[in-house]
Every structure is written in C-alpha cells, then in structure tokens.
Image (cartoon, rainbow, N blue to C red):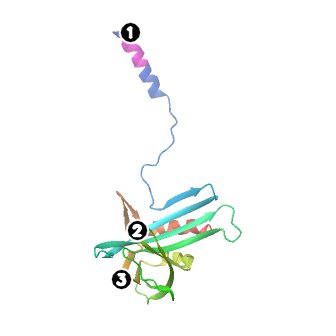
Amino acid sequence: MKLILLPLLLLITSCTTQQVKEPVIEKEPRSAISEKIDDFDNSTTWNYSLSSVNKVTNNAGELETALLSFRCTKYAQPKSYSSGSYSFSLIPPSSLYISFGGNYADFKWDDNQPELREYNHSSGAYSDYAFFYYAEELLNKLANHKKLQIRYSTLTQGTQTVEFALTGEKKSYFNYFPIEQDISEFLKKCDSI
C-alpha cells in the first residue's frame, strides 16, 4: 500500500510546486464600452450605448426604452479623406416620422433651452435609426452635462421625449458601471482619432 501512495504523493507534490504560466483572464469587465479590431481595414471601433430612463410607446402601443448609441472608429493608416469617423444615433422603439424637407429632433442638455438637431433617417430590420449630423460635437458635449432629453416625431405615436442619464450607474447584465467614467473613457479613445 505504501508503494502505491508514495508515487501518488510525489506526483501531487510536483504538480503543486511547478508554476504553470496561464494567461491572465479578466473575469469582471470594468467598462460597458465595447471594442472591435478589424484587421481587414486596419481599424479599431469603440461602441457605447445608453438606455433611456423613461419608457415610450412602440408601434404596437407597448412601453419600451429608447437607445442612444455612440461609435467612433480610428484607422491605423488614415484613408485619403479621414483618420476616423464618429456616430451619434437614437434608436427609438417606434417608427420615426420622415420629412423630405429634413428630419429634426430637439436636444435639451440638463435644464438649458432646447436646440434643434438634424438627423439622417435609416430603417433597419427591427427599428428606425436617427443618425445625427455633427456627431463629434455632440459626443464632446456628453461629459459636460448630467442628462439629455431628446424630443422627436414618430409616424404612429406622435411626439415623444426620451431622457438619458449621463451620470450615475449603468446596469449591464449583472454589473453596474459608472456612466460618467465610461463616457470619459470613451471620449479619450475617440480623441485619439
């Protein structure tokens, strides 16, 4: 019996004393910012999104949150026209009203007077998208305010106003991320463009 236990004891001892070099895997994400590296066009894209604090009606009359999405892309070797791009978009739960004279929404930062912002309308498989012009300017305003309200016209539900908190915590699955810290980190990444 001792002859069997002795080799087993030596094996266990040698396994515990040898250091195994394993890659460090971060188990808990520290940010809600996603990053995508595209080797084909040699670019890095960062995405960040916020859900509205309030819910508005969708095309079926049910309450849903709207989504505010930010994106910036940096090209390692700038294309002839740009070293990067920016996107600031609203994804409402109901269809946007389309005007051939231009599509506009009102932006209200904190308690300031509203400002009119033009957007390009796009339809996807599940939703409409409002891509706002001068995205870089809008992104830079995020860090200086605590809330943003956007009022827009829909095709079936009339005028709707959604509010987004730019401070506090963002729930992402089982984690809570500080919004202002994520916005600050996102803007630093975009500033490198």
Q: Nearer the viewer, residue 113 or 79?
A: 79
Q: Quick check: 74 left or right of 62? A: right
Q: Which residue is mark 1?
A: 3
Pointers 2 and 3 in contact (C-beta within 8 Å): no
User: Which dot, 1 or 2, sits closer to the camera?
Assistant: 2
Q: Which callout, 3 or 1, points at the residue further toward the start of the chain?
A: 1
CA gap between label 2 and label 3 equals: 19 Å
| Label of residue 160 in the image | 3
Q: Which callout, 1 or 2, points at the residue further toward the start of the chain?
A: 1
Q: Nearer the viewer, residue 176 or 98?
A: 98
Residue 47: x, y in percent? Answer: 50, 64
Residue 110: x, y in percent? Answer: 41, 83
| Label of residue 126 in the image | 2
Q: Magenta span covers which residues?
A: 3-10
Q: Residue at x 35, y 10 (%)?
A: 2
Near mark 2 (Cα within 10 A), the count class, few <14, some 14-19 or many ≥20, is few
Up/down of 36 relative to 19, above or below:
below
Up/down of 92 relative to 39, above or below:
below
Residue 150: x, y in percent? Answer: 41, 81
CA gap between label 3 and label 1 equals: 80 Å
Near mark 1 (Cα within 10 A), the count class, few <14, some 14-19 or many ≥20, is few
Residue 64: x, y in percent? Answer: 32, 72
Residue type at the position of mark 2:
Tyr
Q: Residue at x 52, y 36 (%)?
A: 21
Pointers 1 and 2 in contact (C-beta within 8 Å): no
Residue type at the position of mark 1:
Leu
Q: Nearer the viewer, residue 128 or 32?
A: 128
Q: Which callout, 2 or 3, points at the residue further toward the start of the chain?
A: 2
User: Which dot, 3 or 1, sits closer to the camera?
Assistant: 3
